[in-house]
Amino acid sequence: MKKFLFVIFFSIVYLLADTNSTKILDPVYHIDVNKYPKFQAKIVLANGKEILFCCPKSMFNVYLRPSDYPEYHIKGELDFKKILVKDYLSGEWIKAEGALYVFGSKLQGPKGDDLIPVRNRDALNIFRLKYGGSKVLTFPEIIHKGMGLIKYLDMP
């Protein structure tokens, strides 16, 4: 009987703890973004709303196709106030427009292949020594390649 009460008690505690935790779901992949803190990205809109993503690939998806996400009321480029990614090595937020993105490394993001951001060339060299990487892209290059690149990264 004591074992049964013990199991019931800890089940209730577990359920209460789980309902109190704040889950923030990625708008593209519907994954809890807090499970992958090193890959997070975010967009701050001109209206002050923040959109948190599980990975840069997801953030680029919304950036390139905002009309697919009408709940954010993004009409154009002026609606984007800040675009931030986490430098993979330091974990610090950096401006997405100035980051370098590594493609084809040993790392996998929450949804497979991703564009792993690093802060600068020095960080890039350290990253590539540790994780490899077949290509490095800048923000404008990713925007130029568009959704074709993002869909390619999502291929199984």
Image: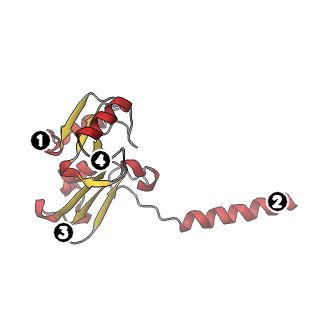
Q: Amino acid at mark 2?
A: Phe
Q: Amino acid at mark 3?
A: Ala
Give me the residue at 35% from left, 45% from top.
Answer: 88
Residue that carries the numbered disc 4 in the rendered image = 56
**Which of the two discs, 4 and 3, labels the residue nearer the N terminus?**
3
Residue that carries the numbered disc 1 in the rendered image = 144
Closer to the camera, 144 or 122?
122
Give me the residue at 22% from left, 46% from top.
Answer: 99
As measured in the structure, the alpha-carbon distance from the residue carrying label 1 to the one carrying label 4 is 16 Å
- Residue 155 seen: no
Check disc 4: other Cα within 10 Å, few if <14, some if 14-19, many if 20+: many
As measured in the structure, the alpha-carbon distance from the residue carrying label 2 to the one carrying label 3 is 54 Å
Check disc 2: other Cα within 10 Å, few if <14, some if 14-19, many if 20+: few
| 2 and 1 marks in contact (CB < 8 Å) | no
Number of the label disc, if any, that sits on residue 46: 3
Observer-side mark, 2 or 3, equals 3
Give the quarter of the image for residue 146: top left
**Which of the two discs, 2 and 3, labels the residue nearer the N terminus?**
2
Observer-side mark, 2 or 1, equals 1
Q: In this view, which residue lies farthest toward the right?
A: 1
Q: Amino acid at mark 1?
A: His
Q: In this view, which residue lies farthest toward the front?
A: 122
As measured in the structure, the alpha-carbon distance from the residue carrying label 2 to the one carrying label 4 is 46 Å
Residue that carries the numbered disc 2 in the rendered image = 4
Q: Amino acid at mark 4?
A: Pro
